[in-house]
């Protein structure tokens, strides 16, 4: 069976349509750092073997490294075939390694011998990274959804998606809600490289001719940083800001965070005392200690609202339209946001 090798665009498009399994032939360490979204790790070499073979290559050359590779991993080839059968019982797989070289070709040869239909990525993961960077650098018809802390912007984004709009949930990709308390209840954050991979992959699924909604974010979402080119596109794109009443925002924040242990909330509050002001931080902590969550949220919103206003003034968005948003009549408010978006697009 002839091996099929595809350029990055054809590889991604073919994989997304195929329903097949995508295998990462790199070491588990490389995979854990970052990988093509949806890929499953099936390393030709484990971390230890990769280090030994790399040293052999530097000291003795390619041929010696190849022999060492077969010596270390050859006896385990049957395990890799069995694992591949478990992952892809229909025996159709897409494979990549770092450069589209020896590791992916050997794994492809091995699986073809076992009856698999194999497609390789030309240029490997390195080519994919270039593809990702071009996706988030490319100007698109972005619309930024703004609003103060507690407004429910992420929830609004997903309601717009249900209404047929295109969105990118940056906080969802980052596993972080953006604030000092944003990691609570979330999965561990990805590496910066994998966050970028997820962003590029999401963008590749969207129609670039239509508008794409993104949430107004600072450069950092937890420890993940918006790529500079993407951040510049965000802060210069038109923005529609939702105005939600302070009482509603307070109740939403209480519902979201009051179930976490008080000592964790205190620790997070103290972590911003230098920016918030020691006296304000002290008062917020005292509210938490006596279980006064509305008082705590009130002090925190004083800080976050001031920070949001300052940040908004620094962003050179071409348009900043405000829409009053009421959660007790969210359907009508959602239509108003979309109406404003249509007016901006004219």
Image: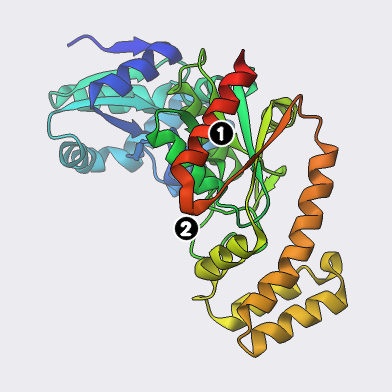
Earlier residue among tags 1 and 2: 2
Crowd class of label 2 (few under 14; some 14 to 19; many from 20; radius 10 Å) = few
Nearest the eye: 122 or 250: 250
Left or right, residue 75 beside residue 223 = left
Whole-percent x, y for residue 268 in the image: 67, 71
Q: Quadrant of the N terminus?
A: top left
Whole-percent x, y for residue 28 in the image: 42, 45
Quadrant for residue 296, please give it.
Answer: bottom right
- Residue where numbered disc 2 is placed: 187
Q: Quadrant of the C terminus?
A: top right
Which numbered tag is attached to residue 337? 1
Per the model, the C-alpha gap separating discs 1 and 2 is: 31 Å
Residue at image location 56% in from the left, 46% down from the top: 153
- 1 and 2 marks in contact (CB < 8 Å): no
Residue at image location 23% in from the left, 38% down from the top: 77
Nearest the eye: 319 or 314: 319
Residue at image location 67% in from the left, 71% down from the top: 297
SS class of the residue under badge 2?
loop
Quadrant for residue 301, please give it.
Answer: bottom right
Give the vertical position of 256 relative to 42 (above or below).
below
Give the vertical position of 222 relative to 291 (above or below).
above
* Res. 140 in view: no
Left or right, residue 119 beside residue 162 = left
SS class of the residue under badge 1?
helix
**Eye-nearest disc, 1 or 2:** 1
Q: Which colour scheme is used?
A: rainbow
Whole-percent x, y for residue 214 in the image: 58, 34
Left or right, residue 30 beside residue 130 = left
Nearest the eye: 28 or 8: 8
* Res. 344 in view: yes
């Amino acid at each position: 069976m002839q091996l099929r090798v595809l350029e990055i665009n054809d590889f991604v498009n073919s994989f997304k349509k195929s329903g097949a399994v995508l295998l990462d032939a790199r070491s588990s360490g490389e995979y854990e750092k970052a990988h093509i979204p949806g890929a499953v790790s099936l390393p030709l070499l484990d971390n230890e073997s990769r280090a030994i073979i790399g040293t052999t290559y530097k000291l003795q050359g390619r041929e010696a490294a190849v022999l060492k590779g077969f010596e270390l991993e050859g006896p385990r080839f049957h395990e890799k075939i069995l694992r591949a059968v478990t992952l892809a019982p229909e025996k159709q797989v897409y494979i990549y390694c770092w450069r589209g070289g020896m590791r992916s070709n050997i794994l492809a040869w091995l699986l073809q011998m076992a009856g698999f239909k194999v497609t390789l990525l030309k240029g490997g993961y390195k080519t994919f990274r270039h593809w990702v960077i071009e996706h988030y650098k490319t100007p698109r018809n972005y619309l930024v959804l703004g609003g103060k802390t507690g407004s429910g912007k992420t929830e609004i984004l997903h309601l717009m998606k249900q209404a047929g709009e295109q969105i990118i949930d940056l906080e969802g990709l980052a596993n972080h809600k953006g604030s000092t308390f944003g990691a609570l209840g979330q999965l561990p954050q990805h590496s910066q490289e994998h966050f970028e991979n997820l962003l590029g992959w999401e963008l590749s699924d969207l129609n670039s001719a239509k508008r794409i909604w993104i949430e107004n974010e600072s450069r950092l979402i937890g420890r993940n940083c918006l790529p500079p080119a993407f951040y510049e596109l965000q802060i210069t794109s038109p923005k529609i800001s939702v105005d939600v009443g302070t009482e509603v925002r307070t109740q939403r924040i209480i519902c979201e965070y009051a179930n976490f242990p008080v000592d964790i909330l205190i620790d997070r509050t103290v972590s911003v005392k230098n920016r918030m002001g020691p006296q304000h931080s002290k008062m917020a902590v005292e509210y938490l200690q006596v279980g006064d969550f509305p008082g705590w949220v009130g002090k925190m919103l004083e800080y976050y609202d001031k920070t949001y206003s300052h940040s908004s003034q620094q962003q050179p968005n071409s348009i900043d339209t405000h829409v009053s948003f009421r959660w007790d009549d969210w359907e009508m408010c959602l239509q108003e946001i979309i109406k404003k978006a249509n007016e901006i697009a004219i």
